[in-house]
Image: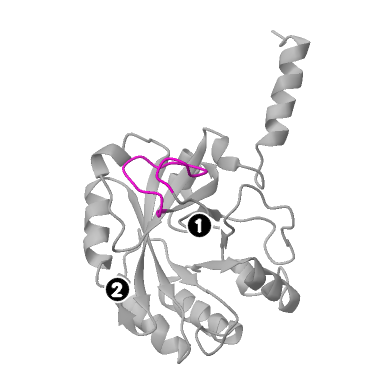
Amino acid sequence: MRLPFFLCILSLKLSAQISEFNKPWEDSTKAIIIDAYSENKIDWVVLKTDKRVVAVIHKATQGEKADPGYSTRKAITKQQGLLFGSYHLATPGDPIRQADCYLEMTDGDTTELLALDLESLDSTKHMTLANAEKFIRRVFEATGRYPIVYCNRVLLNEISSRYNNTSLFAKCGLWYSRMRSDIPDYNATVWPGYALWQFSCEINCKTTGTCLYNVPGTAYDMDVNVYNGSVEELRRVWPSLK
């Protein structure tokens, strides 16, 4: 049975409005992931009313130090039947020692998503791209998996100016940080698209309930991400996200 002409036109318009780079969270099939700080409060009963929220990511290590809230958050997340991931906040210093610290903290959990958080190009505060390569390689040698790489637009453009789609970075999935409702200038030199897009946090949402996507049981300052795929697809590829 064919749709009436006006419904076909409406369907095409909606598809054009909701795309990978334009409000993908408005597509009710897309999976939602939160990455929570230790101080972010979560009402788990309320959160689980949103069946699109299927995973939680939490910081495990920073430099060579463990995050104090990691173990508790991991245990609760798994008790709730949700997927769990972690990230390492990269700092200056020996990238191998940082990778080993991170791997020791995650303790060989093969169900846990691994991620490298690259915050800026300031080498006095954060890891250089050359050291990031060493970190990634170390994680792969130890686990057989590449961590996903978290970065913002400035870092994405810099990585894209130095590397290509055959590089070590390209073997990792991209976790893109861009606090807005669309991405008009995505640089696809290294990654053809993102695996995760962090689109909402306290930077672009100041009041609970007014965010681009409101995760029930959380406040406005929760970091919210969309997966470039369905809930079923995310469950299938986790934790080897690409």
**Residue 134 in magenta?**
no
Q: Is residue 216 above or below residue 10?
A: below
Residue at the limit of the structure toward the front, as seen here: 207
- At a point 29% along the width and 75% down the height, the residue shown is 105
Q: Is residue 188 above or below residue 12?
A: below
- Amino acid type of the residue tagged 1 in the rendering: Leu
- At a point 66% along the width and 40% down the height, the residue shown is 19
- Amino acid type of the residue tagged 2 in the rendering: Asp
Residue 65 rendering spot, x and y as whole percentages = 31, 82
- At a point 48% along the width and 44% down the height, the residue shown is 211
Tell me: 200 left or right of 221: right
Q: How is the image coloured?
A: one colour
| The C terminus - image quarter | bottom right
Residue 3 rendering spot, x and y as whole percentages = 71, 11
Residue 116 rendering spot, x and y as whole percentages = 48, 72
Which residues fall within the magenta stretch?
Answer: 207-222
Tell me: 1 left or right of 115: right
Tell me: 169 left or right of 87: right
Residue 225 rendering spot, x and y as whole percentages = 49, 51
Question: Given this view, does label 2 or label 1 mark the residue nearer the observer?
Answer: 2
Residue count near mark 2 (Cα–Cα under 10 Å), binned few <14, some 14–19, many ≥20: some
Residue 67 numbered tag:
2
Marks 2 and 1, how far apart at CA: 23 Å
| The N terminus - image quarter | top right
Of mark 2 and mark 1, the one earlier in the sequence is 2
**Residue 220 in magenta?**
yes
Q: List the residue tagged with mark 1.
A: 241
Secondary structure predominantly adopted by residues drawn in magenta:
loop
**Nearest the eye: 142 or 32:** 32
